Image (tube, grey):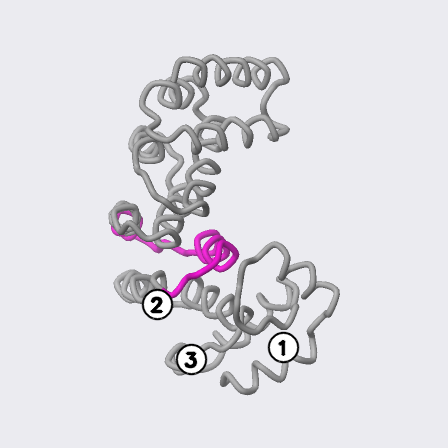
Amino acid sequence: MRVGEIDRILEERSDPEYKEFNSRIVPYEGKMYGVRMPALRSIAKDVIKGDWRLFLEEDTGSFEQSMIRALVIATAEMDADERMERMAGFVPEIDNWAVCDTFCGAFRTGPGNASEKLWHMCVELLDTGEEFPMRAGAVMMLDHFLDDRHIDEVIRLMCTVRSPGYYYDMGAAWTLSCCYISYPEKTEDAMFSICASNEILRMTVRKIRDSFRVSAADKERLKERFKGFKARS
């Protein structure tokens, strides 16, 4: 399936109301059709059934094409080395949170030591100083590395890595809030002892307080603790 054919399908499945909604929440300056996620997943599956490598050689000209590209790289059958190589080429192209988070959530790590290769790439992304590659590193950690083996390092990195970008800060806060749900004590200890960004800390507390998986008492305690932390800062 070629890009021109996909554009025709996207045009047929476009929804003006959804396009208006999506354009409000996703900062994207290029073309946007307004096609919902289930349809994009279906198109990506059709691409994968054909010569998906040829598709990836073509330029993407719309938000939806970028989403399909993300899904193809994340889920098509390939060995771990090829997926890592394609990830390394794709991540610098990411320029919005929706493509970033879709790619990270769909990403298949593969067997053997592929997971550790992904971990090392995530750590490298956090060191780029670039907003969306850094967000990709953070959200990949959220989706694939909130486990006993990696949790201490995930928490440390989310608390200490700094970025001037809002979307990285939000990604780090989202990851930390999920760390708190699974590992509350060690996450809270780190949040209030080593977190280098008051903004990430504020966002993290807010996201925890928005969660249905945290008790009302813990939410109130965190709120008051953050107030006290700000007063001392």
Q: Earlier in the sequence, mark 3 or mark 2?
A: 3
In the displayed image of the protein, which residue is found farthest to the right? 17
- Determine which of the numbered discs, if any, sits on residue 59 in the image: 3
| Residue 194 rendering spot, x and y as whole percentages | 31, 23
- Quadrant of the rendered image containing residue 138: top left
Side of 121 relative to 19 (left or right)? left
Within the magenta stretch, is there residue 5? no
Within the magenta stretch, is there residue 106? yes
- Determine which of the numbered discs, if any, sits on residue 10 in the image: 1
Q: Amino acid at mark 1?
A: Leu
- Quadrant of the rendered image containing residue 42: bottom right
Mark 1 vs mark 3, CA separation in Å: 16 Å
Mark 3, mark 2: which one is toward the viewer? Answer: 3
| Residue 69 rendering spot, x and y as whole percentages | 46, 70
In the image, residue 144 sits, relative to residue 42, either above or below, namely: above
Give the residue pinned by disc 2: 78
Prevalent SS, magenta region: helix
Q: Secondary structure at mark 1?
A: helix
Q: Could you tell me which residue is drawn at 36 percent across and 65 percent down?
A: 90
Residue 180 visible here: yes
Q: Earlier in the sequence, mark 2 or mark 1?
A: 1
| Residue 74 rendering spot, x and y as whole percentages | 42, 62
Mark 3 vs mark 2, CA separation in Å: 21 Å
Q: Which residues are magenta?
A: 93-117
In the image, residue 71 sits, relative to residue 128, either above or below, namely: below
Query: Which of 148 and 19 lies nearest the eye of the viewer?
Result: 19
